[in-house]
Each structure stands twice: as structure tokens, then as C-alpha cells.
Amino acid sequence: MIRPPETFTTARLLARPPRVADAPQAFAVYASDPVATRYLSFPAYQAVTPLEEFFHTRENVWAGSSEGPLPWMLFLRDDPTQLVGSIGVTLNDRAAVFGYAIGRAYWGRGLTAEALTWLVDWALAQPGIFRAWAFCDAENLASARVMEKAGMLREGVLRRWHIAPNISPEPRDCLVYAKVR
């Protein structure tokens, strides 16, 4: 199985696996914000404890004791104590699928596209990965633009495919983007 690097850097970001101790800052920066989580697959967190539990499960995945998505916490390279958000990858037989959540204070700076570009390039450089892809709610045009900046092309619409619990319990349409080799 292909394993991504535990850490990576870009021109403006440092990325590393989450730690339980990151939960309070993640809660404050994006995880509790109903606007930042509006289109995501999880409701805005109401307390830090469930986020700590989630980060603990992700630590286990990085340690190899369980399987699942591999996330990184994104920090400003010039101030490595300042959390920006998170980005993650799920690897399967021939593809890598990405997801991200960024604090509103960091929207519009190109930071998400910078991290996603790095990961897409990494994924497609792996011999067994032929597809790097992501999706966003059909109304989340800012996220669609992030994927375009990362070199992904829009492939189409997945009808009633994704539930964004902060909006509705009903499945919503999503835009799917990919870069292939």
C-alpha cells in the first residue's frame, strides 16, 4: 500500500498529522464554525471532546493501527503555531480522493489550492495512482475554484450524492473534479 509522507511543506504552509492537542485550536479556527463547515460532511462541532476523539482515531491511522483517511493539519510556514485548517487523502487501488476544511480567516489567499496542488502532484507521481480527485457541493463555487487551481478538471455532477448536514439531511448535488495521468 502506498503511504503518503507524514509531513510536507509548500511555499507558505507546513503540514503534519493531527494530534489530540490540536483539537482546541482546530475547534476555534474551523471545526466549530457553521460557515466554514457549511458544505462539509460533518456538522459543526459543538464541543472540543468529540474533535479530540476524532483526532485520536486519525493518530491511529497514521500509526498504522487502523485504516482510513489520512489528514494533515495545515500551519503557516512563517508562524508554525498558527493553524489554517486541514486537508486529507483517502487512497484506494488506483486513486486518491481529497478533502479539506479551512478557517474563514484564511479564505481567499490560495492556501488551500497550494496544499491541494502539492498533494495532487505527489499522488500522481506514485506508480499505482492514476487518478487524483475531489468533489464539492454544487453551490460551493469557491471550493470548485480551489480544485481548478490545483490542476483538476471538472468531470461532471454527481446528483443527490453528498449529505451536508449543516444544510439539509437530504443528499445534495456535487461537482466532481479530477486530474489523471
Image (cartoon, grey):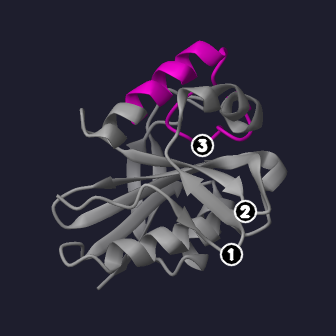
Which is nearer the N-term, disc 3 or disc 1? 1
Q: Is residue 111 above or below residue 62?
A: below
Q: Residue at x 56, y 29 (%)?
A: 168
Q: Report the mark closest to the observer, 3 or 2.
A: 2
Q: Which residue is mark 3?
A: 39
Q: Report the mark closest to the observer, 3 or 1.
A: 1
Q: Which residue is mark 2?
A: 77
Q: Is residue 165 above or below residue 74?
A: above
Q: CA distance from mark 1 to mark 2?
A: 8 Å
Q: Which stretch is magenta?
A: 32-58
Q: Which residue is mark 1?
A: 11
Front one among 135 and 3: 3
Q: Residue at x 63, y 60 (%)?
A: 14
Which quadrant is home to the C terminus?
bottom left
Q: Secondary structure at mark 3?
A: loop
Residue 154 in sight from this viewpoint: no
Which quadrant is home to the N terminus?
bottom left
Along the horizontal axis of the image, is 43 left or right of 175? right
Residue 170 lies, in percent from the top left, at: 46, 31
Residue 120 lies in what quarter of the image?
bottom left
Residue 52 in sight from this viewpoint: yes
Along the horizontal axis of the image, is 38 left or right of 8? right
Which disc number belongs to residue 119?
none
Front one among 98 and 53: 53
Three-letter amino acid code of the residue under disc 2? Arg
Which is nearer the N-term, disc 1 or disc 2? 1
Dot 1 and dot 2 residues touching (CB under 8 Å): yes
Q: CA distance from mark 3 to mark 1?
A: 27 Å
